[in-house]
Image (tube, helix red, strand yellow):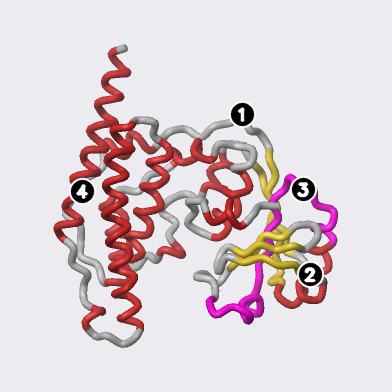
Amino acid sequence: MIGRKELSETLGMSCVEKYFMAWLSKSYDIRKLYGSGFIGLGQVFDDFRRGATYENYYALPRLQDVAEEYGIVKHEFLPCKASSAIETLRKQRDDKLSLIRVNTRFFLKFKRSSWREDHYVCVDKNLHWLNEYPLSEGEFTEEEFAEVYDGALCVYEISDLTSEASDEMTERIITQNFAELPELKIGSFEGAIGVLRTTRRRMREYYASERVKGVLTEELGILDKLYIRARLKEERRRAGSTKATEHFTTKEELAEIVKQEKQIAEALNDERTTDGKN
């Protein structure tokens, strides 16, 4: 069973991805999966201009899907009744990851609910549960389990830990198109920056180059500040402030981010050129 600390430290985009990363990290270097995809600045901003949301952003492949594509793991999705799910869980090996879909009754004791309609909770054979958002844990009785269970059990298991995903990220970074970024309304801006924060943190862990890591650290500092400002403004918007509904203009900061992304592309291209000569 994964723990709260491991779960809170993952760089996942969804609850399932976070549970999966915390679980797989116990036996596999999860950073090896980070190179499987890259989202450029222009695409992120254009996607959110067109109505994308953070909780349903699928332009970046989920790491559990990448791991399964490369044969590292396999999974079963089991639509079944609560009694069957409990029976399956009771027989489950400790090295597997078991997730159940929960209904809205699960959140009655919390002041917050999940971002998505289809929310999953990690459960072990003793019906001990761990929830990603809000971060919490407990233990179900069989009656409580049946009350919050929403008809689906998902089980992951290790298949081949020697397999590795290919690096698709480096080429896409180097060839990234740095067109002018569109203005976004505050809610969309917050989501776009959220995606960039997660993906650029993954990039910093993926690349060994100190030059690349240094630029990414600077970029993440700006992204963190922008995210906090956007979060505060979005909260004011939800509280009824009319000014907060306007476009969120941060041209200087975005220009600096574009500059840093170009530096990353140049650094990776220089390293590739140097390696090609050796």
Which SS class for mark 1? loop
Q: Which residue appears at 48% of the width and 51% of the height? A: 11
Disc 2 target residue: 82
The span picked out in magenta is 87-112
Disc 4 target residue: 258
Q: Which residue appears at 31% of the width and 50% of the height? A: 220
Amino acid tagged 2 = Ala
Q: Which residue appears at 21% of the width and 72% of the height? A: 247
**In this rendering, is residue 151 above or below 216?**
below
Of circles 3 and 1, the one toward us is 3
Q: Is residue 68 visible?
A: no
Disc 1 target residue: 162
Q: Which numbered marker is on residue 94?
A: 3
Mark nearer the N terminus (2 vs 1): 2
Mark nearer the N terminus (2 vs 3): 2
Of circles 4 and 2, the one toward us is 4
Q: Which numbered marker is on residue 210?
A: none
C-alpha distance separating marks 4 and 3: 45 Å
Amino acid tagged 3 = Asp
Amino acid tagged 1 = Thr
- In the rendering, at what x and y percent does residue 185 appear? 26, 71
